[in-house]
């Protein structure tokens, strides 16, 4: 089952659009250089951390509910749709950004990727 028109590997390999990848446990597995430049996270700081590391605290519960619902039902409600949400920066600030989330299932395991474009300057 594939829930996106883009391949996850194509999304994360983009050089000019910030992108992040996570496994079905919600653990960050990859970021591209554009993500590092936009949000300040270095690979050693962020890889292996939960996705909530970059999600503002007030959105943690909503994220957990939506993520669990998708894994249980495999019915997407937000995949491929632009979402305007804040991202937590490496320095602790927040930055409004447009997220587009993609999912791909291979060998019975889900992989997620998102393009996350900054919409403003750091708060």
Image (tube, grey):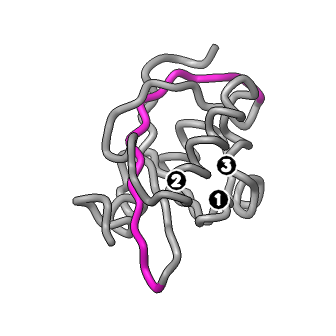
Looking at marks 3 and 1 on the same chain, the residue that comes earlier in the sequence is marked by 1
Looking at marks 3 and 2 on the same chain, the residue that comes earlier in the sequence is marked by 2
Question: Crowding near pointer 3: few (<14 within 10 Å), some, many (20+)?
Answer: many
Q: Which residues are magenta?
A: 92-107
List x then y, in percent, for residue 70.
Answer: 50, 53
Identify the residue position indicated by label 2 in the image. 20
List x then y, in percent, for residue 55.
Answer: 66, 35
Q: Of all residues shown, which one is farthest toward the front?
A: 73
Depth check: give the residue in front, 114 or 106: 106
Circles 3, 2 touching at the beta carbon (< 8 Å): no
Looking at marks 1 and 2 on the same chain, the residue that comes earlier in the sequence is marked by 2
In the rendered view, tell whether residue 107 sits above or below residue 104: below
Helix, strand or loop status at disc 2:
strand
Depth check: give the residue in front, 85 or 59: 59
Identify the residue position indicated by label 1 in the image. 28
Circles 1, 2 touching at the beta carbon (< 8 Å): yes
Q: Of all residues shown, which one is farthest toward the left?
A: 5
Left or right: where 72 falls relative to 101? right
Left or right: where 46 falls relative to 31? right
Q: Main secondary structure of the magenta part?
A: strand
Question: Looking at the rendered structure, which numbered label has been put on residue 57?
Answer: none
Circles 3, 1 touching at the beta carbon (< 8 Å): yes
Identify the residue position indicated by label 3 in the image. 51
Residue 100 among those drawn in magenta: yes
Quadrant containing the C terminus in the rendered view: top right
The residue under the point 43% across, 36% down is: 99
């Amino acid at each position: 089952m594939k829930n996106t028109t883009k391949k996850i590997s194509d999304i994360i390999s983009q050089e000019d659009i910030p992108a992040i990848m996570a496994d079905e446990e919600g653990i960050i597995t990859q970021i591209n250089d554009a993500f590092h430049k936009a949000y300040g996270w270095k690979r050693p700081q962020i890889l292996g951390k939960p996705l909530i590391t970059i999600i503002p605290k007030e959105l943690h519960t909503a994220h957990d509910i939506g993520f669990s619902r998708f894994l249980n039902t495999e019915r997407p409600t937000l995949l491929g749709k632009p979402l305007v949400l804040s991202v937590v920066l490496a320095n602790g600030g927040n930055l409004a950004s447009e997220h587009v989330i993609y999912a791909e299932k291979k060998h019975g395991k889900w992989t997620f990727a998102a393009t996350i474009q900054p919409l403003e300057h750091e708060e």
